[in-house]
Amino acid sequence: MDPIALRLTNCFKTVFPGMPEADIPEARQPSVAAWDSVNAIMLVNVIEEEFGIEMDFDRLAELDSFRRIHDYLSQEMRLS
Amino acid sequence: MKVAEALKILQAAPRNAPEFRIGLACGYTPLHVETFLGAHLQQRLGERRVTIATGLYGDLAGTLEAWKEANLDGIAASLEWADLDPRLGFRGAGAWGPAATADVLDGSAAMLERIARAVEAVRPEIPIAICLPTLPLPPLFHTAGWQAAEARLELDRALADFAARLARRGNGALVEPARLAQESAPAGRYDFKADLLTGLPYATAHAAAVASALARLLTPPAPKKALITDLDDTLWRGIAGEIGPENVAWDLASHAQTHGLYQKLLASLAEEGALIGAATKNDPETVRKVFAREDLLLRPDRVFPIDAHWGAKSASVERILRTWNISADSAVFVDDSPIELAEVAAAHPGIECLLFPSADYAAAYDLLRRLRDLFGKPHLSPEDALRAPSIRQGAQFQQEAGVSVSEKFLAGVEAVVTFDFSLADDLRAFELVNKTNQFNLNGIRYTEADWKKRLLRPGAFLATVSYRDKFGPLGKIAVMEGRRENETLFLDTWVMSCRAFSRRIEHQCLHAAFARSGAREVFLHFQPTAKNGPLRNFLSSIAGEKPAGPFALSRGRFEEKRPKLYHRVTEASTSSSPWIPSHSV
C-alpha cells in the first residue's frame, strides 16, 4: 500500500470505526451507510488534519469514494 | 484538540458505563462543537459515557424550551448573533440597512428575553453553560467597520443584561469572552464558506475552543485549597534579614508592584476561603516585624501558619500541611528559587510548585492568572470565609487538648452540633462531598446534576452538620446522604472535614442518623480508598474490625461502642424537612 493510501486508510478508520479495514480501499459513499453528509464533512476534516491541506468543499460531492479521494490527494501532494 | 483525536476519545468511551447526558443547544450545525464537546467531557469523566443530544437547526430558543423537563446532566448553549435575529447572520435573506435596524434590535431583545426565560425554566439541578456570540456581525449597520455602530452597542448592552441575569442564576455559568479570545483569536474564528455551504460557521479550531470552554464550565476542576508562599523576594522584594524589615518593598514606586499584586491576590484568595501559609528561611522575629508593617497588603491574620526557620522548605511544607490537615495535591507552593521548588516537589510529589518570577513581568502576569485559575470557584459560600479562622481555631483546640483529647477537655469546650435534615439545595454540602478525602465513606465524586438527582430519590436522606465551640465556629463540616428503606438507613455518602476531627462529631453524626431515622441499622456503603484511612479507623473502632467493604451496623452495637458525647445538639430547618421525625436527635 502506498503511503497516501495508508494514511487515508487511517482517516477512514477514525471516521468509520465499524468498517472492516479490508473493505476500506473499495469504500464508496452509496454503499457505506455511515457515510452520510455529516460524516462526509468529518472525513474531510480528518483528512485535512492528516495531510495538512485544505480541501475544497465545492468538490465534496465528487469525492465520494476511497479511490477518488486517494486520486485527489495524490494530485494535491504532487502540486505541493 | 484535533477532530481525529476527538473521534478517537469518543470511540474509546466505556460502552457499559453510566451515561452522562448533555444537551447542546445551538442554532448552527452542531457537528464539530458536538464532537469536541463530547471529547472534552469524556476526557474529564472517564468512567462515564458521554452522550450529546442536539436540537433543531436555527431554533436555539425552541431547543432550550423543549429541555425544561429533560433528563439531562447538563446543558451547553452556544449562542450566535443569528440566533437573536436571522439578519444578524450571513445565511438569512432578510434585509440589512437603516430601515431594518430598529426591527433587528427589537427582535433581538425579544429573543434574548425568550432564551433567558427558557434557561430559567430548566430544572435547577441541571447545570447550564452558556457561550455568548463569538463571531463578527455582518456589515448591516451604517458605520465603517472601524467605528462601533450605536445599534451594535445597543445589542451589546442587551446581551450584557441577558448574561448578567443568567450568571445570577445558581446553576448558570458563562464563558469568559476575554479568555476565549486568548484561546481562539477573533480573526480566525469565522469560516464564511463553510457557513454558507454547510451551516458550519466555526473554523475547526474555534469549534474546539468553544467546546473546551463549555466543557470546563460543565465539569469545573476542583479548586486548590491552600497556598504556601515563600516571603523574601516573593511576598515582598528584598531579603528582610539583610536590608531590614522596614526596607522590603511591594509598591509601584519601588518597582516592586508585582509583589504587591501577589499580596493582593493572596488576600483575595484568603477572603474566598483559601488557606495561606508561609514557609521561609528566616529569623522569626524579622518576619514578625515585616508582618507588623501597616502597609502590608496581605493582613497578617490571613496567613497561618508562618513557618520561619533555617531548615529545609520541604519540612516547613510538611508541618503546614499537617496543621491544615490537607494533602499536598490540594496545595500550591510559590517560591522565587527553582532549587527550593525542586526540593519541595521532590518531597511532596502532589503539590503544585510555581516559580515567583521577580524580574520577569510577563511571567509574573502569567503567575497571577495561573493562581486565579487554580483557586477559581464557580460560586462563593458563607462557609468559605470561615475556613481560615477555623484552622486557627483547630490549632488552638489541639494545643489546649494535648496529644490525646481528655474527657474533661471535651466536656468543657461548649460544643454545639447542628443538624439540618432538609433536602435543601446546599452548595456547601455538594462541595464538601466532592473535595473531602480522609473522612470519606467511599471516595465517590458526583456531578452537580447527579447529586441533586440523588436527593430526589424516594426516602432520600440528607444531613448537613455544622459545629461550633468556645474557640469559634467551624461552619458546615459534615454531610451524610442516603435513603431510608423500612428499618434500614442506607448511608451512601458520608464525609467530614478533617478540621472537625477529635471532637467526636462522627459519633454524634451516627447517633443522630439512628435517632432521626428510627432505623434499627445503618448500612454503610464503605469502600477503602488510598486516603480514607481516618474514616476506616473510626469504623473499626465501632464495628470491632477494620471493614473491607460495605457493612451493616446495628443501633445496639453502635450505642454499646460509642463514647460519651458532650455536644449540645440542635436542629435547623425542621419545617422544610420532608421527614416526619420519628425521634428527636
Image: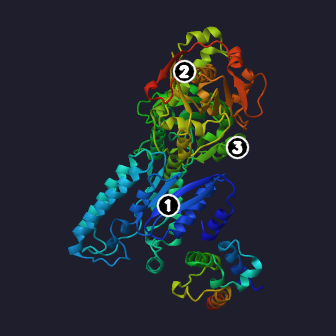
From this viewpoint, which residue is outermost toward the front?
B486
Neighbours of disc 3 within 10 Å: few (<14), some (14-19), many (20+): few
N-terminal of the pair, mark 3 or mark 2, is 3
Residue B344: horizontal and vertical position, in percent?
68, 41
N-terminal of the pair, mark 2 or mark 1, is 1
Amino acid type, residue under disc 3 in the picture: Pro
> Which image quadrant: the N terminus of chain A?
bottom right
Per the image, the residue denoted by label 1 is B24
Observer-side mark, 3 or 2, equals: 2
Residue B359: horizontal and vertical position, in percent?
52, 51
Gap between marks 1 and 3 measured at Cα: 38 Å
For the point 59% across and 27% down, the residue is B499
Mark 3 belongs to chain: B
Amino acid type, residue under disc 1 in the picture: Leu
Task: Say what secondary structure mark 3 lies in.
Answer: loop
N-terminal of the pair, mark 1 or mark 3, is 1
B553 w.r.t. B197: above or below: above
| Residue B349: numbered disc | 3
Observer-side mark, 2 or 1, equals: 2
Per the image, the residue denoted by label 2 is B582
